[in-house]
Amino acid sequence: MEKVIISPSILSADFANLERDIDTIQNAGADWVHVDVMDGHFVPNITIGAPVVKAIKPVSKIPLDVHLMIEHPQNYIDDFVDAGADIITIHYEATGEMTEDVISHIKSHDVLAGLSIKPKTPPQDILKYLLMVDMVLIMTVEPGFGGQAFMRDCAEKIPVIKQNAPENLIIQVDGGINRETGKICRSLGANSLVAGSYIYKSDDIKAAIESLRK
C-alpha cells in the first residue's frame, strides 16, 4: 500500500513554542511540517511569513510544506525559497493566467511545486497543470482558519484529479481532517493529509498521526 504523507499544520501549534511542537510531531512520525501562510487579503486571517519559515528551518529534520494563501504569490517565491521551504504550494485562484509561470518559477529553484484549489473551484480548472506540478492540494474547508468542519462534497474532487494525474502526483487534502475524514480521502485516492487541531489537540500525538494512515 502506498505510504500516506502526513503533514501536521503548525497553525494549531503553540507559536511561543514552535521548536518544541515541531520536534514533537517529527518524533511522533510526521513526514512534513505544514506551514500555513495567510496575508489577510486572499483569506480573512493573518498568520506568518518567510521570517518564521527561516527561523524554524534549522530545527526541522523533515521537509517544510509551505502553503501560500496569499495574493500575488509570485512576488514572494524567492523569499520562501531562501527561507528554506521544501515544498511551495500556490493557489490557482491567486495566480489565474499566470499559474504556469509561477509554477515554473518555483521549480526553477529545485523545490517541489504544489497547486491548491478552494472549495468552490472545480477540479477541471487545473487539469492542464497536473503534468507541471508535484502536488495538488484540495481544500475541504474554506481556507483561513483552523478547526473547521470537513466539507464532504469537496473530497469528490480527489478522484477527478487522480484519474487525470500522472502516477507520481501527490494529492493532498487539507481541512477538517481526522481519522474518519482522512479515511474518506484516502479511499478516494488522496496520498497526503494535512491535519492541525486533530493532531495537536490529541492526548497522544503519535497515535493521532498513525491513525491517519490506517
Image: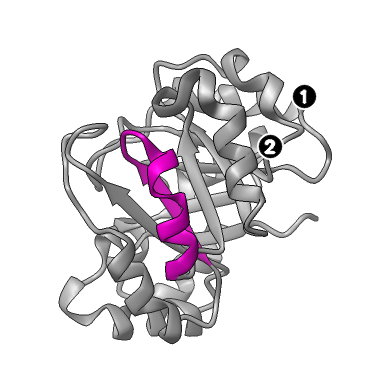
Where are the magenta residues, as a range? 64-83
Q: Secondary structure at mark 2?
A: loop
Quadrant housing the C terminus: bottom right
**Disc 1 packing (10 Å; few <14; some 14–19; many ≥20):** few
Q: Is residue 97 above or below residue 70?
A: above
Marks 1 and 2 sit apart, C-alpha to C-alpha, by 9 Å
Q: Amino acid at mark 2?
A: Gly
Q: Is residue 96 above or below residue 181?
A: above
Q: Which quarter of the figure has residue 41?
A: top left
Q: Residue 144 at what x, y percent from top left?
A: 24, 39
Looking at the image, can residue 25 be seen? yes
From the viewer's side, name the closer residue of 68 and 202: 68
Q: Is residue 34 magenta?
A: no
Identify the residue under disc 2: 189
Residue located 45% across and 17% down the image: 121
Identify the residue under disc 1: 163
Residue located 83% across and 40% down the image: 167
User: Looking at the image, is mark 1 or mark 2 earlier in the sequence?
Assistant: 1
Lateral position of residue 25 relative to residue 159, left or right: left
Q: Amino acid at mark 1?
A: Gln
Marks 1/2 in contact by CB < 8 Å: the verdict is: no
From the viewer's side, name the closer residue of 31 and 55: 55
